[in-house]
Image (cartoon, helix red, strand yellow):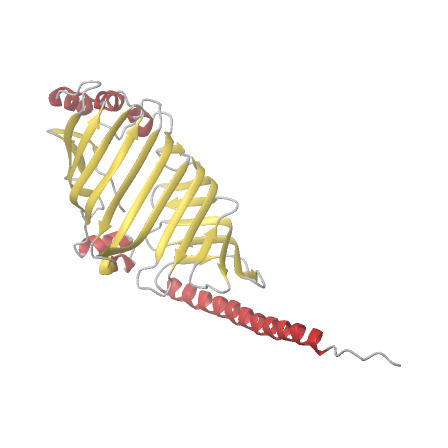
Amino acid sequence: MTSPRHSRRGLVVPFTIVGVLLAIWTGWWFYLTDQVETRLAAHEEVLREDGWRISHQPVSVGGWPFRARVAFPSAEIVAPSGHGVSAPELVAEANAWNPGHWVVIAPDGLTLTRAGKGQVDIGGGARMSINRLRDRFPDLRAELIRPTFTAREGAEPFPIASAEHVQFEMRPHLTDGVAATDELDVLFRLIEARGRPGGPVEGAARSGRLSAEIEATIEQASRLRGVDSAGVFANWTAGGGRFTAVKGRLQAGESSARIASEALSAREDGRLEGELALTAERPGEVMAGLAGSRSGAVNRAAAAGAAAAAGVQGDRPMDLTLRFRDGRTWLGPFALAPAPKLF
């Protein structure tokens, strides 16, 4: 008596389904990566027509099956303003099932080009993520992990020598849970920065470390998309753009301060204008550090005079007001230093 023969259809069907799904997914992956290459090339051409300088070695694409990975060897991107970045390699990655969220890394460091000031090599980890690319204003997050900053020969000194962490975030401003039409929220964090020898940061921190956390809302955000030789902030400033609801905290050595401003804007030359209120703890150490700074950017006599006129004492908390006007930073009648410059 012969044994009944068992059908192998039950084994074949699952493998067939998996094979079909894999073929469909592979087709999607090749379509996605082809679209990425095509759109990148088209976008680069548009930027070049607008005055950008973009160069890199031939792009390589990989990451199958779950990622789209695009590598740009010897990459350089320079805006019409002259500001730009370059890197031995830039790598952009996205999950194949979520092509609207990309992460860009510079595994071998970056070089920052500052218009008119020369180049600065940035060591350490560099990473940027962009989410919701199809939205009017995507979510953006950029960070440097334990970066070092080294100005190249002939370049102007960079105020910071190193830091533990630098972070910048930008996302649409929400009002009652609804994204505003033309406003962005921004956040900047600088953690335990060390100033260059003889520079203003080292002076203010009394050879200690500087940390800052500042947040604000950008009005007229759509004007940041304009590109010209002065940069996006010039177009934004000309259109009446402002920083509003500015607040944050600074820590310089043993001194600290809470800061706030209803609104700050910028002059045509990029220097900030407006008032910044500070509630300072142990302000005397910062003022003494500025008065003894070897940096040419700080008016040492004015710093000493401002401290004396305001009655600044070492450990006593004080409410102070910094005014940015005429391209300078003022404390009372004393011009301490140039006002911060956006572009």
Residue visible at 58% across and 63% down in the picture = 64
Q: Left or right of 216: which side holds 21?
A: right
Residue visible at 24% across and 60% down in the picture = 178
Residue 158 visible in image: no
Q: Front-most of 280 and 177? A: 177
Q: Residue 290 location in percent, x, y?
A: 25, 24
Quadrant placement of the N terminus: bottom right
Residue visible at 34% across and 49% down in the picture = 169
Q: Left or right of 216: which side holds 148?
A: right
Decide: is 62 above or below 88.
below
Q: Residue 100 location in percent, x, y?
A: 42, 63
Q: Left or right of 104: which side holds 289?
A: left
Examine the image and state in which quarter residue 180 appears: bottom left
Q: Residue 11 location in percent, x, y?
A: 70, 73
Q: How many marks?
A: 0
Residue visible at 38% across and 29% down in the picture = 196
Q: Residue 318 location in percent, x, y?
A: 16, 25
Decide: is 197 above or below 224.
above
Q: Front-most of 165 and 119? A: 165
Residue 11 visible in image: yes
Q: Looking at this rendering, what residue extends furthest in the right direction?
A: 1
Q: Left or right of 324: which side holds 194?
A: right
Q: Looking at this rendering, what residue extends furthest in the front direction?
A: 1
